[in-house]
Amino acid sequence: MHFRYKIEGGDFTNAGSTASAVKKVLKQLNIDPVIIKRTVVGIYEAEVNIVAHAYNGVIDVDIDENRIFARFEDAGPGIPDITKAMEEGYSTASEIVREMGFGAGMGLSNIKNNSDKLEIISQVGKGTTVEITNYFNSK
């Protein structure tokens, strides 16, 4: 199964809608609730990062008999230091984003903690690609 979602930067009203849609599908497929929770947390955090930091983005989700794979591609400022950005509490979110309750600096570390595999590729001034994989069966 393949799903594609378009995300607009700054659209906090719809932030999390992709995570909710994927959760619904995974429940219908009777995926283990622990895997659903881990996957939805990772998708939500990556989706909110696009909304908070990028101009726009696309989320592709592929579900097969062994795994859930989600790819997030955005047109945004990019991440100058991925290692630093992975530190809990580190954030480059604007004051406005923080006032809305986002941007606490837990997004990337939450994604890592809820993913079996995480890859981040970023180019400053162009954007970021995040890939998350969670497996249902043995890896």
Image (cartoon, rainbow, N blue to C red):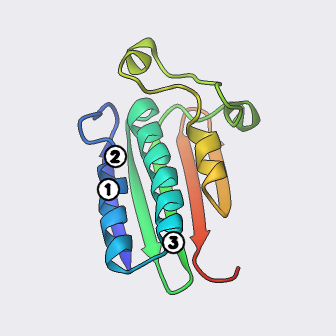
**Of label 2 and label 3, which has the lower sequence position?**
2
Q: Are marks 2 and 1 in contact (CB under 8 Å)?
A: yes
Amino acid type assigned to the residue bearing label 3 in the image:
Ile
Instruction: Identify the residue at image location x=59%, y=24%.
Output: 91
Question: Considering the numbered disc 3 on the image, is that residue within a helix, a strand or a loop?
Answer: strand
Amino acid type assigned to the residue bearing label 1 in the image:
Ser
Specify the quadrant of the image occupied by residue 122.
top right
Residue 25 higher or lower than 97, as above or below: below
Image x and y of residue 105, in percent: 58, 28
Q: Quadrant of the N terminus?
A: bottom left
Q: Label 1, on which residue?
A: 20
Residue lying farthest bottom?
65
Instruction: Identify the residue at image location x=43%, y=35%.
Output: 54
Instruction: Identify the residue at image location x=32%, y=72%.
Output: 25
Give the number of the mark in front: 1 or 3.
Answer: 1
131 horizontally vs 23: left or right: right
Between the C-alphas of marks 2 and 1, the distance is 6 Å
Q: Label 2, on which residue?
A: 16
Image x and y of residue 26, in percent: 38, 72
Residue lying farthest right?
83
**Of label 1 and label 3, which has the lower sequence position?**
1
Q: Label 3, on which residue?
A: 68
Q: Nearer the viewer, residue 81 or 25?
A: 25
Question: Considering the numbered disc 1 on the image, is that residue within a helix, a strand or a loop?
Answer: helix
